[in-house]
Amino acid sequence: MRILPSLRRLVVSLSAIALGAALFAAPAASVEERVKELLGRMTLEEKVGQLVQYSSREDMTGPATASSIAPQMQSGGVGSMLNIVGAAETRKWQKLAVESSRLHIPLLFGLDVIHGYRTIFPIPLASAASWDLERIEKAERIAATEAAAAGINWTFAPMVDIARDPRWGRIAEGAGEDPYLGSAIARARVHGFQGDGSFATTETILACAKHFAAYGAAQAGRDYFTTDVTERVLREVYLPPFKAAVEAGVGTLMPAFNDLDGTPCSANPFLLDQVLRREWGFRGFLVSDWAAVEELRAHGNVTDLRDAAKKAFLAGMDVDMQSEAFGPYIAGLVRAGEIPPSRLDAAVGAILGAKFRLGLFDDPYRFSNEEREKTAMLHPESLEAARDLARRSMVLLKNNGVLPLRTADLTVALVGPLADAPLHQMGTWRGQGRKEDVVTVRTALEQIYPGRRLHYAYGCDVRGNDTQGIEKAKRAAVDSDVVVVAVGEDVYQTGESTSRTSLDLSGPQLALLKELNSAGKPIVLLLMTGRPLLLEAVEPLVDAILVAWHPGTMGGPAVADVLTGAYNPSGHLPLTWPRSVGQIPLFYAHKNSGRPAPLKQDDPYYSRYIDSLNTPSYPFGFGLSYTSFGYDRLRLSAPTIREGGAPLTVTARVTNIGKRAGEEVVQLYVRDRVGSVTRPVRELKGFKKIELAADESRDVEFSLTPADLAFWRADMTFGAEPGDFDVFVGGDSTAWLTMPFKLEASR
Ligand code: BGC
């Protein structure tokens, strides 16, 4: 009996020697050659194994498999895992896969590294408000470096869903409402995670653009719900960030939970095959969202699990996350001739290709390095980058002069449930972020206002109706020169499956603000949130509003930097901030309609509400600074551009007209006055973040090409149409500095 294990070991090492001579094991061969050779050795079942992905544990997003998957792993029946973390743990599973399976194929380890692994950066919606592509890219590189040291070689990020409905909790995970900004940020995030795509260093990992597509268009803002999106809107609004991610080389995509024009994205050939692979030339692979293949049954477009597996796989889905649909059924479907073997080889080839590119065949443990894991986390430079991105993400919406706070002589009341709340400060999808690593607003402000110069009071809960602590908070206010109130959303109110019908401050938070207001001291509202919350009732009660979002591990010092003016705020809204839920969806790039304004005085028959203005509380692109910026001298290089000709140069002078240095996000919008289909009133077509000293002026230049004016025309071809346009330059989407120009057809 004792001889058996050693016999098995002998067989394993003999086969390893045999495989060592194989082309797929030879690093010098090209990835394509190695994939082809390996595919030639695989049985049907081994190929199907590559399509199977399991979670290691029970997960909050759905039911995980309870039974041990080790035997399946040994037979080559698993291709990737998710939610296994740590170098030791990933190494253990990798060893099992590599040493006990016949072909020694390594596993991929995926995880939702959404805004940091251990060093938690501000939530993605927040970092989008920085409009700072370089720093966003750097943050993802740090996240990748930390995750990679812990064995993770694949992140389910970036989430590039355009979201125009803040009732939807997942608005926190994306870059806001605009396809141009969203595309720029998608590229930055993909480059951050994947570098140049060679994976030559262990500071890069495979990325996954999700959720493909129009997940943010869920009707009524209800997560996972159905959508009703025309192909034009799909292509103009929801698809561009995915296309940008594909052009940036993203290795994988995740189809969305929702359906699209009646076909769930997970089994949608138009989306997964026609658009993604044929039109865009995507060569990577697709991973389903959690149990999404199985959920096709509930959608009601398949009869059973076998049918679900067949439809999803034929449409183009490659990896089945946690549905147990591909594993049991794909081999049978191939044998029955219902799935062509070429489709299976294409899927498996793409998965193996990623494993080769990641270097896993040459060193399966390359990402699972316990030594590196010990030293890679929370580097001082990483924490500094997190602090820097957090303060650059904060958006100042109101300031009647109370900010910045003096540090030498003030006594500050710091009040509110989010002032000292490490968990909530990290926001949704916290990776391996730990509460004990977080520097809260309270901790940071205590250092600046030591001893009795800071009066902290919790105030009230974010939710519920306990108002007992409010009195103490008011006393703190009375005893201080100024009040900083940290209210907003807790982590359970933001992210996946947290749709809201009310966007008011929840629980007794408004009551807290009212009571503080009666103390008669200047109030700074520090809004810590994953989405816009309604401010119409709040704004009159406070003297300043700083949107800090959920700012991450170093959010406290970042808040302190902005409050005290150590950093001059420069964030601008990546979405429109509505006045009321009734206005939603509200976004700047809307259509004009036939009745945009009254034709004559007192004419009520135009597009409006009888109980609200049409305008938002704060427009897309808006953000104040402790200085202000003036715009003038808008110039165009020519009154006309020609298709196929030289680009138009748009120049405007921006001047810092305040008393201190500051950064401004200079934005360029275009309006196409007449199209074969109606066009948005404005579209963002460029932005530059610049820094100006007090009194400094600078000419800021943008280049516009006819391609920038292209859209999906009446006949659903993509291109620009000759005619009249307007260009606008300014500090938000209501920019008033404007000039007309013409696009002429090529001669
Ligand atoms: C989410 C995805 C996530 C996946 C794996 C799902 O519930 O929709 O965004 O990547 O879980 O954790």
Image (tube, rainbow, N blue to C red):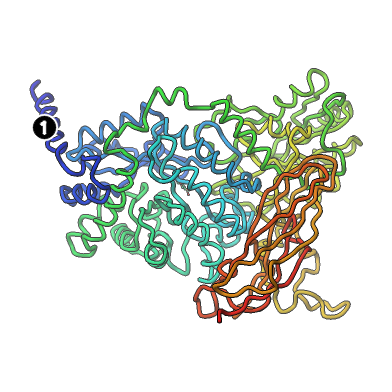
Q: Residue 410 in the image: state x and y as whole percent.
A: 86, 26
In the displayed structure, does residue 217 sit left or right of residue 324?
Answer: right
Tell me the kind of residue under disc 1: Leu
**Residue closest to the far right:** 520
In the displayed structure, does residue 739 sit left or right of residue 109?
Answer: right
For the N terminus, the quadrant is top left
Position of 128 relative to 363 (above/below) = below
Total numbered labels placed on residues in the image: 1
When asked about the image quadrant of residue 485, the answer is top right
Q: Nearer the viewer, residue 302 or 149?
A: 149
Q: Residue 406 in the image: state x and y as whole percent.
A: 84, 30
Write the residue at 84% across / 44% down. Answer: 658
For the C terminus, the quadrant is bottom right
Q: Residue 159 in the image: state x and y as whole percent.
A: 51, 50
Write the residue at 11% across / 24% down. Answer: 6
Write the residue at 34% across / 32% down. Answer: 366
Label 1 secondary element? helix
Position of 140 relative to 433 (above/below) = below
Q: Is mark 1 within 8 Å of ligand 1?
A: no
Q: Nearer the viewer, residue 392 or 109?
A: 392
Write the residue at 56% across / 61% down. Answer: 217
In the displayed structure, does residue 128 sit left or right of residue 51?
Answer: right
* Residue 538 appears anywhere in the view: no
* Residue 393 appears anywhere in the view: yes
Q: Residue 274 in the image: state x and y as whole percent.
A: 39, 67
In the displayed structure, does residue 642 sit left or right of residue 63?
Answer: right
Q: Nearer the viewer, residue 430 or 363?
A: 363
Residue count near mark 1 (Cα–Cα under 10 Å), binned few <14, some 14–19, many ≥20:
few
Position of 649 relative to 546 (above/below) = below
The residue that disc 1 covers is 14
